Image (spheres, helix red, strand yellow):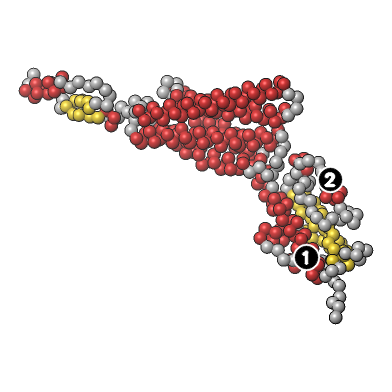
Amino acid sequence: MNENDQNIQPKIENNNYQTSSDITRRLDDDGIGKEVDINTSNNSSGPRVVIMQWLTYALWAGTIFATIIVFSSTLAYFMLDQMVGTDTSAIYGIAAICVMLPLAIVCDIFYSKYENEKKSIFSRVVMIVHAVLFSLVAIGLLVITIFSVINLIINITGTDQTMVALYVSLFSAFLYFAVFLRVVLSDQLLWVRRYFKSVMFLIVGIVIIAGISGPAGDAWRGRIDKLIESNLQTVVYAIDDYADKNNKLPAKLSEITLKDDAKKLITDKLIRYEIINNVESQSSYYSSSFYYKLCVVYGRDTNNNHVDYPSMEERTIDGDYSSYVDTYSHNKGEVCYKLRTGVSSYYNTPDVK
């Protein structure tokens, strides 16, 4: 043994390492001792790996939550046939998935490269916190599933709503249990890490397609319907005001004063206007009455989604004519409203000199 080896040997033997956080030695190819902090070595996950780990878990959790929103909205749409054209939660859920799912997959791919390294204390804390949260949520959803089954057994009414709750809770529990396995057992079961991303992508993709064909697509198709439903009565009020001031109906709708969304109905030619006639009224309050028709085209049928009240045509005055449009429930396709406006005799009384 040469003199250099004799000088090195005592230094190595005199070091006692009690914990993994102590400074350790290793020999390079030349046999020269180097001091290395175990927390900065390649054998444990550094801050960047911990950040990527945290983002992976959080993005998968967000993707699952958005998927559950779309799934529940879609299931209610097909099974309950409720809130047709008005439920926009599926649209926002799909938008959130389109943002978070690609980011979750990318972060998962990068994190998987360092997942086999020895985890630092921070990495273990992140894993434990997310594993506990995912497991508790999955257990809670399983409890809701059991409650739904019991409700189906003991109750006769409300089975459709209970079935929706049962399917949603069972589906949600499966997703959270899957991400729990991804967090806890990916080191021991490599197939979990290998197939998790593909399975999630397939499940989420199916939910998105169902959401687009169901509530999201219906809400998109119903955007014109919403514009008509919200502003058609404003057009009727404007016609009433024009008739009061001019003692006649406007020759065309461009002659009435409108603004904002109500004006859009006219500029986009969403209303077909037809004058029927002008008939003298026998009422002491009205000096004359005017009859006309407004026709619009709806893209969806809302008659099956509301309480079966009599339509406005069945609650009219002067026979088949009304002074108010009922856009609350309607059929799909062209719907025409027969309307009446009266000119008050108060505005047509001659001035007394």
Q: Which residue is mark 2?
A: 310
Q: Secondary structure at mark 1?
A: helix
Residue at 86%, 72% (x, y): give it: 349
Nearest the viewer among 181 and 204 is 181
Residue at 57%, 35% (x, y): give it: 67
Q: In whole angstroms, how far apart are the C-alphas of marks 2 and 1?
A: 28 Å
**Contact check, label 2 and label 1, Cβ < 8 Å:** no
The quadrant in which residue 325 appears is bottom right
The quadrant in which residue 15 appears is top left
Give amino acid for label 1: Asp
User: Residue 249: x and y, percent?
Assistant: 82, 66
Instruction: Give the mark nearer the N terminus: 2 vs 1.
Output: 1
Query: Residue 241, labelled with which disc?
Result: 1
Above or below, comparing residue 244 to residue 146 in the picture: below
Query: Residue 69, labelled with which disc?
Result: none
Q: Secondary structure at mark 2?
A: loop
